[in-house]
Image (spheres, rainbow, N blue to C red):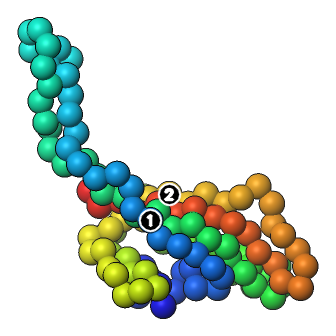
């Protein structure tokens, strides 16, 4: 089961985890007061984990309950926690920084909406 801070936020429907780019932030020396060409490594960039999937519920009210649980984790000052995927891989010290839903709710036998959630390690 996937989780963030031990909360099953994404388990109602299919979802997948992917990581963002990793590496050094490199700036051109010209822009940081240097002369001429060249570049300088400034340090590691923030590490991202992106979760994409669908929230699925049997009623409109239940779907809103799932959405509200996710939005409750987005705080003015992000509090780091452990993010765990369905395969047991965990990322410690991750902050939940953004959540985007698709443009519509799909309604049929169940209600569902696609989303993207962004976690960042500062």
Q: Which residue is mark 2?
A: 98
Residue 5 x, y percent position in the rendering = 38, 82
Q: Residues within 10 Å of mark 2 (few under 14, many from 20)?
A: some
Front residue of this view, candidates 84 and 21: 21
CB under 8 Å between callouts 1 and 2?
A: no
Total marks placed: 2
Residue drawn at point x = 63 percent, y = 64 percent: 115
Residue shown at the point (89%, 85%) measured from the top left: 109
Left-right relation of 118 to 62? left
Query: Where does residue 78 sit, x and y in percent of width and height?
Result: 37, 63
Is residue 116 shown above or below 5? Answer: above
- Furthest toward the right, the residue is 108
The circle drawn on residue 18 is 1
> Percent x, y for residue 120?
35, 59
Name the foreground residue: 86 vs 101.
86
Residue 18 lies left or right of residue 38; in this view the side is right
Is 11 situated left or right of 42 in this image? right
Would residue 104 be seen by someone viewing this image from the given angle?
Answer: yes
- Viewer-side residue, 119 vs 69: 119
Tell me if mark 1 has few (under 14), some (14-19) or many (20+) residues whose alpha carbon lies within 10 angstroms of its own. Answer: few
Q: Nearer the viewer, mark 1 or mark 2?
A: 1
Furthest toward the top, the residue is: 36
Q: Locate residue 10, reporting x and y percent.
A: 57, 79
* Residue depicted at x 34% and y 51%: 21
Up-down relation of residue 31 to residue 118 (above or below): above
Q: CA distance from mark 1 to mark 2?
A: 15 Å
Quadrant of the image for the C terminus?
bottom left
Point out the tag, 1 or 2, that comes first from the N-terminus. Answer: 1
Helix, strand or loop for disc 1:
strand
For label 2, the SS is: strand
Q: Is residue 14 above or below residue 106?
A: below
């Amino acid at each position: 089961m996937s989780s963030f801070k031990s909360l099953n936020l994404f388990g109602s429907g299919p979802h997948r985890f992917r990581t963002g780019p990793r590496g050094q932030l490199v700036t051109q020396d010209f822009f940081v007061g240097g002369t001429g060409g060249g570049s300088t490594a400034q340090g590691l960039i923030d590490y991202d984990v992106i979760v994409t999937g669908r929230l699925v519920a049997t009623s409109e009210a239940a779907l809103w309950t799932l959405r509200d649980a996710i939005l409750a984790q987005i705080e003015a000052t992000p509090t780091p926690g452990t993010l765990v995927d369905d395969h047991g891989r965990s990322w410690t010290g991750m902050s939940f920084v953004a959540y985007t839903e698709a443009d519509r709710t799909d309604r049929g036998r169940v209600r569902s909406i696609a989303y993207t959630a962004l976690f960042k390690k500062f």
